[in-house]
């Protein structure tokens, strides 16, 4: 390598090294998980809306939208978050209790978590 090539190669190598160091220092994002709410015939829209307001702080309109998606599609993504947070929220849904408006309701709704693809 001649002196001119070496003069160009050295700054490029330093730039590449700095870029690698910066990437290594960046905090890595935790994998994301969807919290899925599943449809059943034991809970009213009102139950879902109130539950989502109390557990997630969602406004009435967003609760209604999620309730409608659960009803028409069989499931709905309630939130996408870290695994630990999704597990906590799933457990809160499971512990929320029965729908007092449905006399045959036996308990809480069912929710699961799954990895968010491509996130």
Image (tube, rainbow, N blue to C red):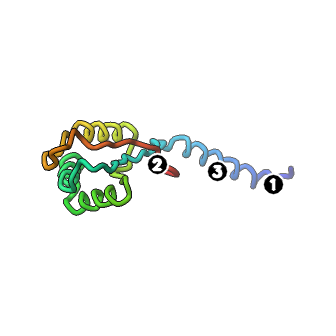
Secondary structure beneath label 3: helix
Image quadrant of residue 87?
top left
Decide: few, some or many residues near mark 1? Use Cα within 10 Å; few <14, some 14-19, many ≥20: few
How far, Cα to Cα, is label 3 from label 2?
Answer: 34 Å
Secondary structure beneath label 1: helix
Instruction: Judge by depth and name the residue closer to the eye, 55 or 10.
Output: 55
Image quadrant of residue 49?
bottom left
Disc 3: which residue: 15
How far, Cα to Cα, is label 3 from label 1?
Answer: 16 Å
Instruction: Judge by depth and name the residue closer to the eye, 89 or 30.
Output: 89
Disc 2: which residue: 116
How far, Cα to Cα, is label 2 from label 1?
Answer: 47 Å
- Which mark's residue is nearer the viewer, 3 or 1? 3
- Which mark's residue is nearer the viewer, 3 or 2? 2
Disc 1: which residue: 5
Residue 112 position, x and y percent, is: 37, 42
Residue at image point 35% right, 41% down: 86
Q: How many numbered circles does the render carry?
A: 3
Mark 3 or mark 1, earlier in chain? 1
Residue 13 position, x and y percent, is: 70, 48
Residue 36 position, x and y percent, is: 37, 48
Residue at image point 34% right, 48% down: 38
- Height in image: 109 above or below 77? above
Residue at image point 30% right, 49% down: 40
């Amino acid at each position: 390598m001649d002196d001119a090539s070496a003069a160009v190669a050295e700054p490029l190598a330093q730039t590449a090294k700095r870029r690698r160091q910066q990437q290594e220092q960046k905090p890595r994002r935790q994998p994301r998980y969807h919290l899925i709410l599943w449809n059943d015939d034991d809970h009213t829209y009102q139950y879902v809306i109130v539950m989502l307001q109390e557990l997630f702080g969602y406004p009435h309109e967003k609760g209604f939208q999620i309730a409608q998606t659960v009803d028409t599609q069989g499931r709905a993504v309630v939130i996408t978050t870290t695994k630990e947070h999704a597990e906590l929220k799933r457990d809160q849904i499971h512990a929320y209790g029965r729908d007092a408006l449905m006399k045959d309701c036996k308990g809480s709704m069912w929710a699961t978590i799954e990895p968010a693809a491509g996130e």
